[in-house]
Amino acid sequence: MASSPSTPVKRCAGDYLPERANERIDRVLKLAGTAEPFAAEELTSTSRAIATLKAALKAADTTGEYAPVYGTPEGGTRRSSNF
């Protein structure tokens, strides 16, 4: 006889999957604590930073130059040699 979705699946004596899953979820939620308030200005600045990075990656795909530009002590610029 197959079990219905609302019937707990018994693996072995006393081991019901939905109960154990709920216990794990409860433990994780307690560890997570309360939610932080939403910061619209943080989302906006992060979105801008991601857009800038996407634009740089697209430009690198076009030019083939993936090494980031760094300033030099003399005031000039150079590309990273780690790429």
Image: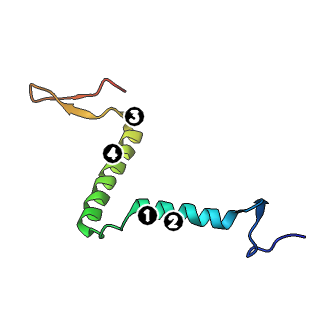
In the picture of the structure, the residue carrying the numbered disc 1 is 30
Q: Amino acid at mark 2?
A: Asp
What crowding class fits label 3: few (fewer than 14 Cα within 10 Å), some (14-19), or many (20 or more)? few
- Residue identified by numbered label 3: 64
Cα separation, mark 4 vs mark 1, equals: 40 Å
Residue under pointer 4:
56
Label 1 residue SS: helix
State the mark number for residue 26: 2
Q: Amino acid at mark 3?
A: Gly
Q: Residue furthest front?
A: 14
Q: CA distance from mark 1 to mark 2?
A: 6 Å
Name the image quarter holding the C terminus.
top left
**Residue 57's quadrant in the figure?**
top left
- Number of the front mark, 1 or 3: 1
In the image, what residue occupies the spot 66% across and 67% down?
A: 18
Instruction: Report the Cα–Cα distance between label 4 and label 3.
Output: 11 Å
Secondary element under disc 2, as helix, strand or loop, is helix
What residue is at 48 percent from the left and 60 percent from the top?
28
